[in-house]
Structure formats: structure tokens, C-alpha cells
Amino acid sequence: MTNPLYSVERFPLFPSTALAFEAFDERYLMALTKPSQDYSWVGLGEQIPTDHAILRFPLATYFAEYMQTQGENRTNTPIGNKFFEVKSEEFDTGIEEYLYKLQKDPIAARRWALFAETLPGRQERFVSKQLALLLEAGKTTIGLDGVNFFSSAHPGDYVGGSGSSGTFSNYQSTAKSVLVLQNILDEAAAMASVLDSSGAPAGVEPDTIMVPLSKGISLSSLLAQQSVLRTDGTSFGVVPNPIAGHFKVVVNPSLTDPDDWFLLDSRAASRFGITPWIVMTENVSTDLGLRKFDENSDFFKNHSRIKISSHLWKGFTLAFPQTIRLVNGA
């Protein structure tokens, strides 16, 4: 009995390198039209395609504010030339196979075809993992304001650098479960203390809770309940869920801690022009992005195999701490 997973109809053999590459391109391009939803959380930050290897962001473009045009009360914040940069780096993966196996072995042909079909998903997963690593290192990574990206002591006027406008926190170090409504209410209220570049309340309103896979279903179920048990300790009974329909649950499959969770203001980019992270993609030619090694290549002459390698030029950075809050989970 023929296994349909390895049938010639499903994964035809490739009598020539040209046909192998042609089939790869067709399956890869088809897969590009079906973006995965598993890593859509990346879009909560800013994604920038560019033709440059380095992007520089002057802080003045993010923190320009109206002030009195004339008069002795006008003051200028010394933003100066402060900026941050994102640099692209090259990353690659690929597949190689003996040509005679692609001509005769349906398992090798299947492996070749499936790599093409899954390559866009691999690219999305790679970006997701890189960003998740940055977020999980944020408690010990120095940010734009000179303190850790997730910190309880961000200077409110770090653009000016005088430190005279108080501080704000985007980090809860005490362990709190995301599956307790009061914890969500308390941490959302804490984000109201976030300050803008002048030291005034920034007006951040969290509307998104990002959790690891282990908490996604339970949290979605909790937030979908229209009524919940009263938990204030003063009385018993059923009361309306105070945050039903308010928060969107975003599951991040790349987070490694099973309990930590994040609050985000997904509208901050459109309202304030600031974002928690930036992903830059340096545009390169097709030949540099997807490289093919046929029988005429030195690779084939040295290894007797044909090869396709996929190369990405990406840059990643955490950006503005005002838009995101990390809560140690429990």
C-alpha cells in the first residue's frame, strides 16, 4: 500500500536540477501568500523595510511638543542630538540534497518540497524568537534612558537628561498571576503613572495582554466571562466582570517563561508615535536572498549535492518603555 504522504502525485520526483528549483520556487511563492497567524504579535511593534544597513532614530522626532510661541515662559528641552540605532545582520538557513536522490527517492523529494512550503513560516518564527529573546532579556538590558528596559525607575524626562521630573515603572517584580482579575486591574492602573518626555502623564492605556502558550486558553476564557465571583473579601456573590471585552489576548509562542506576562498599549504608535520594539528588514536582491547552487557551482563539485540557502538581513531593538509593562508571573 502506498503511503499518501510520500506519493509521487503529492511530491513528484525531480529528474533535473532545473525542475527541482522550479518546484521549490512555486511552492515557496505559494506559501508566501498564506502568512501564519501564530507570530502576529510581532506586529505590536514597528516593522520597517529599508534599503539601508543602519537606521538612526533621532529622539527629537518622537518627543516634539507644542509650546508657547513667544514670551518669557517658553522653555526648550535639551534634546540635542540624542538618537538610537538599529543595524541589520545577515542570517541564513537552507537545504541541500543529492541530485540522484531527488530523481529517485520520494522521501528526499518530499523533504525538498516541504522545506519550500515551510520556509516563510520558518522566517516568521525566527523573527518571533529574536524579539522574544530581547523581551526576556529586558530586565538586564540597558535602554534608551540609561536604565534597564524593564525597570521601576525610568526617568520621566530622560530626553532632557536632568532627572527632575520624577520616575515611572514598567516592571512589576512581585510575582502575580495573570489569571487573577485584580492583578490585571492593578497592573493596568500602574501604567497610568507612565510619564512622557516632559514628565507629565503620558496617557498610556493598555488594551492588550501578551502571554505564553501555557496561559492563552485560560486567560481568554477568564476574560470572556460576563460575570465573576467577588474577590474583595468584603462580601460574597456574583458581579459583572469589570474587564470583559476590554483586553485583547495575544499568545506569544516564543516566550520561554511559562508565567511572565506583558501589558501593552497597541495604539501608542498611532497616538504618540512610539513603539515597544523595532524590526528592520534590509531589502536585498532576490539572488542574495535566495541562493541556488546547481551542478555548475563549486558547492556541487565539492559535495555532489545541489543546495538552496535563504538569507535574511534583519535588525532588532527594544525601543520605548512607556508602551509596555512586564509582570513577573506566578
Image (cartoon, helix red, strand yellow):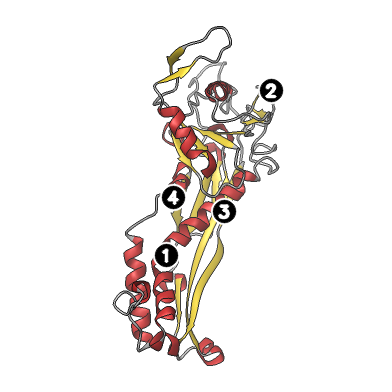
Q: Residue at x 54, y 50 (%)?
A: 254
Q: Which one is nearer the viewer's eye here, 58 or 27?
A: 27
Image position of 117 with respect to 57: above or below: below
Q: Mark 1 or 2 closer to N-term?
A: 1
Measure the C-alpha gap from mark 1 to mark 2: 52 Å
What's the CA distance linking mark 3 and mark 2? 35 Å
In the image, residue 77 above or below residue 287: above
- Give the labeled residue for mark 3: 130
The residue identified by callout 4 is: 38
- Going by the image, does 20 lie left or right of 84? left
The residue located at (41%, 70%) in the rendering is 114
Q: Is residue 51 visible?
A: no
Circles 3 and 1 in contact, beta carbons < 8 Å: no
Q: Provide residue 18's location: percent of width, then percent of height.
A: 35, 85
Give the label, 1 or 2, closer to the camera. 1
Tell me which numbered mark, 3 or 2, is placed earlier along the sequence: 3
- Label 1: which residue? 118
Q: In the figure, 63 relative to 132: above or below?
A: above
Amino acid bearing label 2: Ser
* Left or right position of 146 against 35: right
The residue carrying mark 2 is 164
